Amino acid sequence: MSNGSVNILGLGELQADFERLTRATGNKVVRDAVMAGARIARDKARAAAPVRTGKLKKNITVTRLKQADTPGGATAGLRVKRPAGKTVRAIKGRGKKKRTRKTDYQSPYYWRFIEFGTSKMPAAPFMRPSWDSSLPQIEKAVTDKLAEGIDSAITG
């Protein structure tokens, strides 16, 4: 558990239920369960994030990661959206075309400076402590969502 991953052991009795599920349904159940756990970490990270403009809180998201090496497995991550800078061009002057470029960042690139610190600023982590402190809730959400998904797939 020290590497930030959640392993669920002791689900041997659910193996027969998983075999009854189709592959697509089983994958969806697992993906939904992993995302439910990651949403808990997202909410804690948003609550712990420093607020100046609110841009950082809005851009903390959960993403599902592709896993080619583990069939039937699912991974979700907590991240801050990348800066998607767009260039704004303006033409100024009458006779001459003078172009100015301004990059407008919609998401906060500075979260790394806060989380890890710089040579001039100490670290004030908020992402990693949020993940670590919410591991029991994440595990519970994942197992509850797995059980709910399996039950609904088998009965319905």
Image (tube, helix red, strand yellow):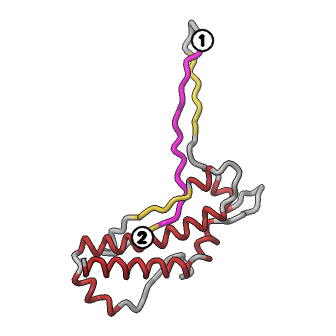
Compared to residue 61, the image places residue 55 above or below, namely: above
Assess whether mark 2 and mark 1 are in contact (beta carbons under 8 angstroms).
no
The residue drawn where x is 72% and y is 57% is 118
The residue drawn where x is 31% and y is 81% is 151
Q: Tag 1's secondary structure?
A: loop
**Which label number is shown at residue 52?**
none
Q: Quadrant of residue 144?
A: bottom left
The residue drawn where x is 36% and y is 68% is 67
Which one is nearer the viewer's eye here, 145 or 110?
Answer: 145
Binning the other alpha carbons within 10 Å of mark 1 as few (below 14), some (14 to 19) or many (20 upward) gives few
Compared to residue 39, the image places residue 91 above or below, namely: above
**Which label number is shown at residue 75?**
2
**What stretch of residues is rendered in magenta?**
77-92
Magenta residue check for 102 = no
Binning the other alpha carbons within 10 Å of mark 2 as few (below 14), some (14 to 19) or many (20 upward) gives some
Horizontal and vertical percent position of residue 110: 65, 52
Distance from disc 1 to disc 2, alpha carbons, whole Å, reads: 53 Å
Residue corresponding to mark 1: 93
